[in-house]
Amino acid sequence: MNEHLLGGKPTAEPTKALETFDNPNPGRDFHIHMEIPEFTCLCPKTGQPDFAVIYLDYIPNKLCVELKSLKLYMWSFRDEGCFHEAVTNQILDDLVVAIDPKFMRVTAKFYVRGGIFTNVVAEHRAAGWQPQPYVELSQFSAQSNIRG
């Protein structure tokens, strides 16, 4: 049996390296949304763990971020002392360097600590990029295609 499937030493390690792949449709603006619900880092004052959900929204230019490398990148903060504001901006900066998106927003929603929830939003826009106008579409009932 494969020891890696039964509690053997993990084969993946945290890393700051972000891998990319070519945008499959660079002629079209499309929105990529990711939710990372298991982000952890350490409070730089107490050393206690801080937990957050990181939301990543971006419109790619020529490159997209590869998911496994993003997971290992997020894991790399687990043992680092980070202020919420600093780590959110660091994630944005690192991703912008890696993929140079047309637009990117990183939203970090930290769980309660000392009775306070902290949400941090950081954004990047490429010079000269303008979003397409939003199109409001009719809503369909969730059960509209089911016949009783």
Image (tube, helix red, strand yellow):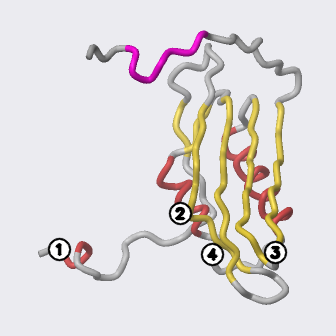
The numbered mark, 1 or 2, whose residue comes first in the sequence reads 1
Say which residue label 2 marks.
72
Dot 4, crowdedness within 10 Å: few (<14), some or many (≥20)? Answer: some
The numbered mark, 2 or 4, whose residue comes first in the sequence reads 2
Residue 139 lies in the magenta stretch? yes
The quarter of the picture where residue 109 lies is: bottom right
The mark closer to the camera, 1 or 4, is 4
The numbered mark, 3 or 4, whose residue comes first in the sequence reads 4
The numbered mark, 1 or 4, whose residue comes first in the sequence reads 1
Nearer to me, 49 or 15: 49
For the view shown, which residue lies furthest in the left direction?
Answer: 1
Q: Secondary structure at mark 2?
A: helix
Q: Secondary structure at mark 1?
A: loop
Say which residue label 3 marks.
115
As measured in the structure, the alpha-carbon distance from the residue carrying label 1 to the one carrying label 3 is 45 Å
As measured in the structure, the alpha-carbon distance from the residue carrying label 2 to the one carrying label 3 is 30 Å
**Residue at the spot x=23%, y=78% of the render?**
6
The mark closer to the camera, 2 or 3, is 3
Image quarter in which the C terminus is found: top left
Say which residue label 4 marks.
78
Nearer to me, 55 or 1: 55
Q: Are marks 1 and 2 in contact (CB under 8 Å)?
A: no
Q: Position of residue 129 (x, y in %)?
A: 82, 21
Residue 106 lies in the magenta stretch? no
